[in-house]
């Protein structure tokens, strides 16, 4: 297959995958929501879970987005240096976004700042965004995330003095949850990023939202920090859609990188109950596996 044909094939596959994510939740999120729904004792909260499940059933049957805000498209790419289309990936992902906007359809959400006009195709300056990791090999892993305007896009980040300790990070996360967690359509997936600067912590917090909702950090100290924050946020009692209930979040993940001796960066990003993200892995021949949606075909 020549390069142009390969580009066309991968663009078409990515467009279909983006569309799928708008109306089908990933396996781990579906499983967790059903678990939370079964455990819930608040009658109104149980009714909200039933409504969520009905929403997902209808979205799947009709093949239409389960939420009107299909977000800003964000791609997190881990690409092998020998993957044949590495140099064309930005073009492929941009054109796939445009195609999915028309075919699915997705709500146009790209507004050029200062000029203040909607591009109508979800493509603009810096959108869709692509975060890269280049590794050995010839495979390409792509996480797609529909980052909603009420949940993950209004994240927050700051930098503490190390003397303030991780207690300051704990207070920062809990304060953020009490101030706008209810507006982000709980139950939530909370991503916490720790790093040396605002930008490092912010990227880490978004990568934390890509981890499985049931995942536990391999570092025991961080795992303890995750559990402490999860228990604290659940104790707030937001419940599904903020109507109160036994659980406020699906899970809490921390992604960390090293810091400068004089800084402790912290960021928090939040995914709503309709946590529309997915992972697809391509081989060098453009065969693919839907890692996040194992029982679904494009």
Image (spheres, rainbow, N blue to C red):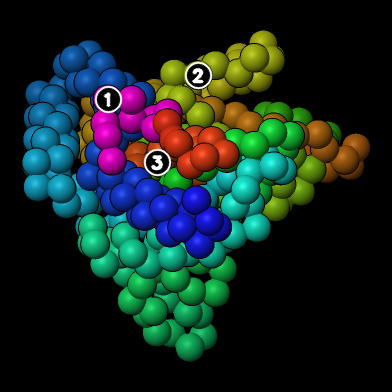
Give the image quarter of residue 99: bottom left
Residue 277: x and y in percent read: 40, 41
- Which of pointers 3 and 1 indicates the residue nearer the eye? 1
Residue 237 vs 90, above or below: the answer is above
Residue 88 vs 53, above or below: the answer is below
Is residue 74 part of the magenta span, yes or no?
no
What element does badge 3 sit on?
A: strand
Distance in Å between CA atoms under marks 3 and 1: 16 Å
Name the quarter where the C terminus is drawn: top left
Distance in Å between CA atoms under marks 2 and 3: 16 Å
Nearer the observer, 30 or 133 = 133
Residue identifier under label 1: 295
Residue that protrudes farthest toward the bottom in the picture: 115
Looking at the image, residue 55 sits to the left or right of residue 176; the answer is: left
Looking at the image, residue 88 sits to the left or right of residue 280; the answer is: right
Looking at the image, residue 216 sits to the left or right of residue 246; the answer is: right
Residue numbers of the magenta segment:
290-298
């Amino acid at each position: 297959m020549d390069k142009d044909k390969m580009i066309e094939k991968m663009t078409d596959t990515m467009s279909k995958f983006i569309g799928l994510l708008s109306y089908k939740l990933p396996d781990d999120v579906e499983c967790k929501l059903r678990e939370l729904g079964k455990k819930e004792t608040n009658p109104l909260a149980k009714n909200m879970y039933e409504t969520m499940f009905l929403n997902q059933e209808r979205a799947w049957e009709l093949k239409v987005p389960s939420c009107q805000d299909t977000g800003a498209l964000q791609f997190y790419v881990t690409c092998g240096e020998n993957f044949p289309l590495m140099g064309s990936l930005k073009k492929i992902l941009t054109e796939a976004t445009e195609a999915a906007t028309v075919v699915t359809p997705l709500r146009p959400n790209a507004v050029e700042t200062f000029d203040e006009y909607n591009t109508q195709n979800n493509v603009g300056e810096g959108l869709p965004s692509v975060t890269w990791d280049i590794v050995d090999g010839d495979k390409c892993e792509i996480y797609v995330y529909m980052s909603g305007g009420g949940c993950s896009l209004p994240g927050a980040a700051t930098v503490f003095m190390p003397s303030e300790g991780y207690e300051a990070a704990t207070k920062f996360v809990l304060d953020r949850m009490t101030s706008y967690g209810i507006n982000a359509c709980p139950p939530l997936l909370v991503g916490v990023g720790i790093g040396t600067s605002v930008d490092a912590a912010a990227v880490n917090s978004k990568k934390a939202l890509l981890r499985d909702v049931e995942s536990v950090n391999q570092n025991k100290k961080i795992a303890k920090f995750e559990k402490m924050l999860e228990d604290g946020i659940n104790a707030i009692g937001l419940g599904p859609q903020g109507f109160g209930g036994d659980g406020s979040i699906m899970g809490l993940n921390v992604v960390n990188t090293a810091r400068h001796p004089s800084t402790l960066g912290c960021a928090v990003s939040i995914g709503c109950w309709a946590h529309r993200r997915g992972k697809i892995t391509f081989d060098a021949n453009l065969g693919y596996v839907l890692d996040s949606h194992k029982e679904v075909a494009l």
